[in-house]
Image (tube, grey):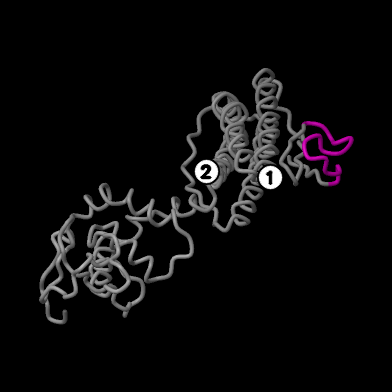
Amino acid sequence: MVGSTVTSPRLRLSSHAVFHSLRPRLFVAIFGREGLSVSEFLDVLAEGLGLVSIQPQAPKQFRESRAIGTSVATRHYGVRRALARGFTTLRRNQKVKKTTSKVAYVGVLGVVTSIGLGAIIPAPLAQNAAGGKTLANLQAAYDGENNAHARYLAFAQKADAEGYAQVASLFRAAARAEQIHLTNHAAVIRQMGAEPHAIIEMPLVRSTKENLEASANKGEAYERDTMYPGFIKQAQAEDNGAAVQTFELARNAEAQHFRLFIEALDNLENMKTPGHTYYVCTVCGYTIADPPSGDCVSCSSPREKYEAVK
């Protein structure tokens, strides 16, 4: 094959066509099998990209020894001689001898090099193959808590600027709680063999009243009633106890944040007096407005685990 310039028509596919037409077959082929060697992995890619087609293997007396790894094409029964020079894509019902794995590998690597393996096997999907939907949910929760942390710090600055010192303290306490949640989520993500990732967006800061309304009704209420209950149900279905625990603790804290934000809205004009302190459980993020009198009501950690936030 050295010096041959014959190219399979399949190799002339655009990256867009490869991405949308061939990727589903590759996902099934690759993620449906475990323990693939390098040569077997390339074989699967070759099959998925259409460089070869698998045919029933001939009886033993017609088989040839494997010279290069695992074969990417099997021989048609009764065919004993290779085609002359050139790489020919095997088509249905063509009675041709298989091309060597090495030739198909060259074709596969050429396609992978030109379009990038990430276009065929995105990293999040590769992670999900091992962790199911719960891993994706953990990543989503980690991203959400990171953004909530940044948003509440920005809201605290706005509250201070508008003279609502107690609301500023509340937002800082909520930000500390979200930081604890994201740390807990990250620990479970790493237990599952992945790395946490988040995209921090620029917070949209309005008036303190509007910030409280959005935080309560669009943020905490959604996490309490929709997001975390769905994540918990999925983690239970996958028997992932660690994910269930971190989701439940976060949901309990978000429900408490909702109550604290609503109380602040109802008493907004009375929250300009400085000096109020909130307390955040450093284990689960549960937040209270008064000094703790006992263990955390959410995770049962001793009251010494509470942190004062002004």
> Which one is in front, 82 or 220?
82
- Residue holding disc 1: 241
Q: Is residue 13 magenta?
A: no
Residue at x 57% of width, y 28% of height: 226
Tag 1: amino acid: Gly
Q: Secondary structure at mark 2?
A: helix
Q: Secondary structure at mark 1?
A: helix
Of the numbered discs 1 and 2, the one sitting upstream in the chain is 2
- Residue 255 % position (x, y): 67, 29
Vertical order, 135 against 51 (above or below): above
Tag 2: amino acid: Lys
Please state, as top left, top right, bottom left or bottom right, where the N terminus lies in the image.
bottom left
> Which one is in front, 161 or 156?
156
Magenta span of residues: 289-304
| Mark 1, other Cα within 10 Å: few <14 / some 14–19 / many ≥20 | few
Q: Is residue 88 left or right of residue 36?
A: left
Please state, as top left, top right, bottom left or bottom right, where the C terminus lies in the image.
top right
Q: Is residue 165 left or right of residue 204?
A: right
- Residue holding disc 2: 133
